[in-house]
Image (cartoon, helix red, strand yellow):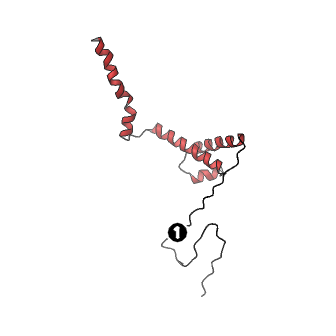
């Protein structure tokens, strides 16, 4: 009888260890895990903004869903790291895609706006 009492808890141990995996398989929400993920993503966003030379306000505006405290913490950590190691900012070299005109706009013969192209004023139609 004493042997059964010792073995019985050992049989239930794998079930207790698998609770988190079972919750993951059933896709049950875990607020603590989601908060940790949001915190890590916010720190990554903040550090990336600092490395590319963006201001904190621009970073907040570009990432409205990220927690501001996490973005600031990541920005500050990257700033301290860059100052300590005397690193320069790495500017972004991506060119934003030109905006496509919507279907409701008039003047389909207007020239396309291309980033980096020289400015050419649009001439009004002769009437």
91 to 120, vertically: above or below? above
Residue beneath disc 1: 100
For this orientation, the residue located farthest to the top is: 2
Residue under the point 47% across and 38% down = 33
As helix, strand or loop, the secondary structure at mark 1 comes to loop
126 to 2, vertically: above or below? below
- The image quarter in which residue 18 lies: top left
Residue under the point 30% across and 13% down = 3
67 to 58, vertically: above or below? above
- The image quarter in which residue 69 lies: top right
Residue under the point 54% across and 41% down = 40
Q: Residue 25 location, x and y as percent?
A: 36, 39
89 to 31, vertically: above or below? below
Residue under the point 36% across and 24% down = 13
- The image quarter in which residue 31 lies: top left
Q: Residue 107 location, x and y as percent?
A: 54, 78
Task: Tell me: 61 left or right of 2.
Answer: right
Quarter of the image where the N terminus is located: top left
Residue 90 or 66: which is nearer the viewer?
90
Residue 15 or 103: which is nearer the viewer?
15
Q: Residue 43 location, x and y as percent?
A: 58, 43
For this orientation, the residue located farthest to the bottom is: 127
Quarter of the image where the C terminus is located: bottom right
Task: Tell me: 8 left or right of 33.
Answer: left
């Amino acid at each position: 009888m004493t042997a059964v009492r010792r073995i019985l808890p050992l049989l239930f141990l794998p079930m207790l260890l698998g609770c988190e995996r079972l919750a993951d398989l059933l896709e049950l929400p875990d607020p603590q895990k989601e908060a940790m993920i949001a915190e890590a993503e916010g720190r990554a966003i903040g550090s990336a903004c600092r490395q590319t030379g963006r201001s904190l306000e621009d970073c907040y505006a570009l990432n409205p869903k990220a927690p501001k405290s996490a973005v600031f913490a990541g920005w500050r950590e990257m700033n301290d790291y860059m100052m300590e190691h005397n690193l320069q900012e790495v500017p972004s070299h991506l060119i934003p895609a030109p905006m496509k005109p919507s279907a409701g706009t008039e003047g389909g013969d207007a020239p396309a706006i291309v980033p980096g192209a020289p400015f050419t004023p649009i001439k009004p139609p002769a009437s």
